[in-house]
Image: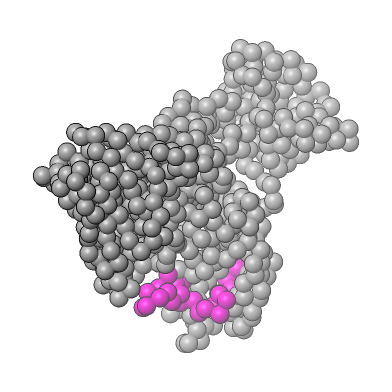
Amino acid sequence: MLRSSARIVRGAWSSSSSASCAVHESLKDCRQHRPLSSPFAHYRAIYYNNSYFCTSTADADTYSVGSGSTCSSTSVSVNSEQVFENENGSIGASSSNSVRRYGASLAAQVLRRKRLGRRRRNLVLERQEDGQTTGMDSAYSAIELALDSVVKIFTVSSSPNYFLPWQNKSQRESMGSGFVIPGKKILTNAHVVADHTFVLVRKHGSPTKYRAEVQAVGHECDLAILVVESEEFWEGMNFLELGDIPFLQQAVAVVGYPQGGDNISVTKGVVSRVEPTQYVHGATQLMAIQIDAAINPGNSGGPAIMGSKVAGVAFQNLSGAENIGYIIPVPVIEHFIAGVEETGKYVGFCSLGLSCQPTENVQLRNHFRMRAEMTGVLVSKINPLSDAHKVLKKDDIILAFDGVPIANDGTVPFRNRERITFDHLVSMKKPNETALIKILRDGKEYEFSMTLRPLLPLVPVHQFDMLPSYYIFAGLVFVPLTQPYLHEYGEDWYNTSPRRLCERALRELPKKAGEQFIVLSQVLMDDVNAGYERLAELQVKKVNGVEVENLKHLCQLVECCSAENLRFDLDDDRVIVLNYQVAKIATSKILKRHRIPSAMSSDLLSEQNNSEIELACSS
């Protein structure tokens, strides 16, 4: 039998040989169980690394511990008497005149408790294999798995001020959950670490917080990977394995650190539905699992455990409803992790770049010559930057995607008598993968192979973890339009923000790669721009007659102006004209007056952009 030399004397850890130094250090992070019942209530049992340790709070009794991980029996020594569990499950003890009987009995109780724990875990595993796992078994299994896997995440973050893009808002603190995955990494939600400036993690049962770095973030799928360099943190930590998509009414247990307390929490529920859902953080439509377990602030990033594996990651709930939560399913998680492992960064989710209409109306199907056995969806709009723009046309009928027939409502078969929108098949494709599209055009069937890749909208939906771009000239503040900019108008931004900007942000598509929607955000008042203050919040279309492609292009056109006057053509046929030299001198005064450190954002100040400006000026 292997035996470590770690001992417990009066509740303090000691070591009798240098070989046990590692054991001595690792025992600092063990987790303490509740006191044993009377008549031995002044003893405590501590469980670490699959072994029980006995401590005495009253006497100077010394105990040594036998490790059962590599031998056929487990033992605990009490004042020179060895109490052990044989292979057949019986408990025995050696004799010693100096042994206190209650001490031997205590050790026997510890071993019996450990044996019962093993029997219960084996019973749970057997029931899982037979598909008979109960909610109680699932919760018990989740607790056993989570104690050495789930961590609490402490984040300090600071979001940009899009109305004053040269400065940040005040920092705020938030908390979330995460869990260990293979490769010494921690998986959590993107919104837990969004706009982070400092991240700490704490494992269960430890008072120590460890510094963590964000390795990759996917804001569309609301997932992030953290890494911790400290080797001490990883001692005793176990990773969780990813499972499968649960079926309806299967039990899951959500583990995390929700608000209302500091310790770990487990809530159980069942799967209600599986379908594409709007991810609030990334404003993306991806598959999600609805459960009836409560998911509260702080639960975000924690695992939803089904049996002994992870069924998903808790990430949002339904406001105004009770006990309706959502978890990110395994296919989305695996897509995110695979992209990070292959490229070293988040690669995104593919899109066809199409807007489609259902063909459930009989007259509509007859108009497009669809035969009775045909089903599909009507193409109504195509993104000019997508590969589909090269081969598909408006009013085409998409009949099948990769050989899977598409119903008239846009759904495809999914598992046992379930259906899901065909967008899910598209989103699960890796970037630059090809797909076979079967269409109906003018009554004839065609098949096209097209390349799929993530597509960027004209107006970005989010801009987490990056500083906003801006350019200031003569007190005119130019910015690219983004939805976070519109969000500065308040929670009801859709109704309170400028109507024309809002409509274009939600509906307009880019015409070329790198295109941005440039807006005159505000006018910092000065003599040089007096009378132009009412022209704020309008789109900038041209500079000296040249159409503006993006903010960098606008910066080049202004900095390289050789004419006496500089003209800006805005939306609604408005015009701004400035004397270039007078405006250039006034710019530095305005910046100093408003304590603005630079006339342009850091991305425009980069060496690459400066070289491009010089090249444009020289030409």
Write the start and end of the magenta stretch as one range: 394-420
**Left or right position of 323 against 288:** left
Residue 506 in percent (x, y) is at 51, 49
Viewer-proximal residue, 597 or 431?
A: 431
- Image quarter of the N terminus: bottom left
Viewer-proximal residue, 342 or 525?
A: 342
Residue 109 in percent (x, y) is at 19, 53
Question: In this view of the protein, can residue 248 be seen by the observer?
Answer: no
| In this view, 187 is above or below 375 | above
Residue 440 in percent (x, y) is at 58, 79
**Left or right position of 77 against 235:** left
Residue occupying image coordinates x 51% and y 44%: 226
Residue occupying image coordinates x 22% and y 59%: 92
- Image quarter of the C terminus: top right
Residue 475 in percent (x, y) is at 64, 21
**Left or right position of 266 against 372:** left
Residue occupying image coordinates x 27% and y 46%: 80
| In this view, 585 is above or below 134 | above
